[in-house]
Amino acid sequence: MELSLLAPIGSVLALLFAVYLARRVLKADCGSERMRKISGSVQKGASAYLRRQYTGVAIFFAVLFAILLTMSIAGFLTPFVPFAFITGGFFSGLSGFIGMKIATAANGRTAHAASGSLNAGLRVAFSAGAVMGFVVVGLGLFDISFWFFFLKFWYANPDHLVVAAGQTFENAQIQSITSAMLTFGMGASSMALFARVGGGIFTKAADVGADLVGKIEVGIPEDDPRNPAVIADNVGDNVGDVAGMGADLYESYVGSIISTGALAVAAGMGFRGVIIPMAMAAIGIIASILGTFFVRTKEGASQKNLLSALRRGVWISSALIAVVAYPLIYFGLGAEYTGLYFAVICGLAAGILIGLITEYFTSDSYRPTKKLAGTSETGPATVMIGGLSLGMLSTVLPVLIVGIAVLVSYYISGGGTQFNMGLYGIGLSAVGMLSTLGITLATDAYGPVADNAGGIAEMAHMPPEVRERTDALDSLGNTTAATGKGFAIGSAALTALALIASYIAQIKVYQPDFVFDLSITNPTVLVGLFVGGVLPFLFAALTMESVGKVAQSIVVEVRRQFREIKGLMAGESDPDYARCVDICTRSAQREMILPALLAVIAPILVGLLLGVNGVAGMLAGATVSGFILAVMMANAGGAWDNAKKYIEGGAHGGKGSDAHKAAVVGDTVGDPFKDTSGPSINILIKLLSMVSIVFAGLVIRFSLF
């Protein structure tokens, strides 16, 4: 069997397994009428938000499709790029939509299952998260496989191919295929940015508004049904942390595979080198499917036991990849290329280590978060100082790990003697890190389902032991979400490095005699570095400000309802949940426009003003500062959140104490850190590269330098 057939086979297996898991989730009991009503409200709100978001995004895609079509007619792009741009965005959006629908259907079922046992609740929530994971890898690999085989068929016709002097027909064919496919990731990146930014603004504005009034001003518990913003908060968990995270990692997954394929051609590996990352992804799907069957726990399990259950599945999948990757490279490329196997192992190891480090800094099982909780004894100010310090400190090890992974992957792949082989090794390292995405994303998407289940248990007034079980699942979800964000940021950094290398290779395709001058003494490179370095900060500022503005609107609305609706505090009247959902929906759509435009316009302007070298500098600057800023924001936010939950578990006076109120302030600030700005920066640094690649031909023709 040809190795290239593994990719479509893997995609079909992933989608079939997702269908199997979805059916299993939907067969579970929905619980009482009250639980069904609450779950239905969350489903209705999430669907309404996505409908409005996709309507707005459709306009953006239509405009960009017209621009790309014009560029292809003018000869700057192949005629397939505008259509592949649409398919990339469509499948990215579809994966988020399917994952969100199953997640919202699973929240009540998880709460009801938890009334039977902790393991039953875990299985339902994890299965729902796994649907998201396997839909993402299945649709991503399907999109890549479709375009690979279609372009291979198209360029098999000599009339459709330009063969340069001294170039073989096969080399010209695979170069044309990968050069075209490299531009396809822009659709997925664009959809991911809208999903992450819009969903992040929605979820954190609702969360902040609900907490500030509900917990601090009125003094009611989290997820109390009297809080008018509680449904909006639960809706936000799904549109931000499920649909948004799914689209984010879909983009990394697709981007790592297609950029590594382009680097394989630059290294002279031909079709064999391009097929290896696709086959690796397919094997990763099979390993992830097997890993899901090892996720189970016992009644009364601690958070460490629960974490071990999820970790067991990821580690078994990683071990399977480590075993199978060697014969794949040995027989697929030859014994002389076994160094590439160790590049894959580097990526796998880096992903696991970054996850463990993120867990250490954000879980309340370890010293950093416990120490942060202790700072609440002296008020909100020391909580803020401690959280920022923790976030900054947590950047050191991930940077070192990525740096070591890049160096080892480069040199062990032969970069010391052949530059392009080293770059191909870095690309394979990124593919290795993302090869277990099916199960890694499952452990992340599980979190919002467990969070919603806890909310439903509270609002439906379920017995205390059920709430204890859902709280245990929710607390675990916070840790897995933080770990997932760390994994997403690490994979984004490696993928962005591969994309930068692919950008340089793409310039050589457009203009083979172009000579790069990437020395920092080159003024255009230096200015590009500064511009790229500041872009993540500008982007984070815009998204943070947006969350603040929308949260203010929610605070005003929640205060109004508590003031004007008679009997609300006594539980005799129902709040107007729909009003808060509508405010978040409309505001999130409006506020996400400027950050999205920044990501698309910045690389084009830099290219036209500073030229190709300036763009390379901008991409390097954005990747370095964006990676560090994203890690800092995500880990600080995760630690603030879990420090608050640690206190709610009885430490430092427990719920309602002054220490708890101080921790709530930290958690409120940390919400947009970890769920809006931090994760969105991942997409920014990849989208900058994608846009630069797509508009490379235009920049070469019309740049000032």
Image (cartoon, grey):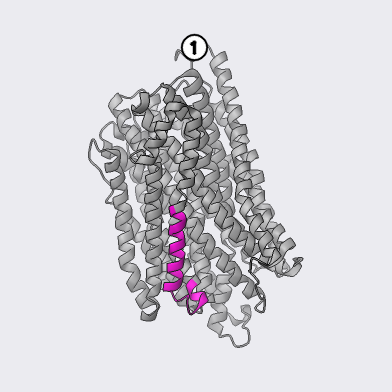
| 658 with respect to 313 (left or right) | right
Q: Which residue is mark 1?
A: 567
Q: Circle 1 sits in a helix, a strand or a loop, which is it? A: loop
> Magenta segment range?
397-422
Nearer to us in this view, 106 or 473: 473
Instruction: From the image, give the main secondary structure of the stretch colored magenta.
Output: helix
Residue 37 x/y as whole percent = 43, 27
Magenta stretch encompasses residue 529: no
Q: Residue at x 40, y 66 (%)?
A: 344
Which amino acid does the dot numbered 1 rest on?
Gly
Question: Eyeballing the image, is 284 above or below 681?
Answer: below
Residue 669 x/y as whole percent = 52, 34
Number of numbered discs on residues: 1
Q: Residue at x 50, y 36 (%)?
A: 385
Nearer to us in this view, 64 or 294: 294
Magenta stretch encompasses residue 420: yes
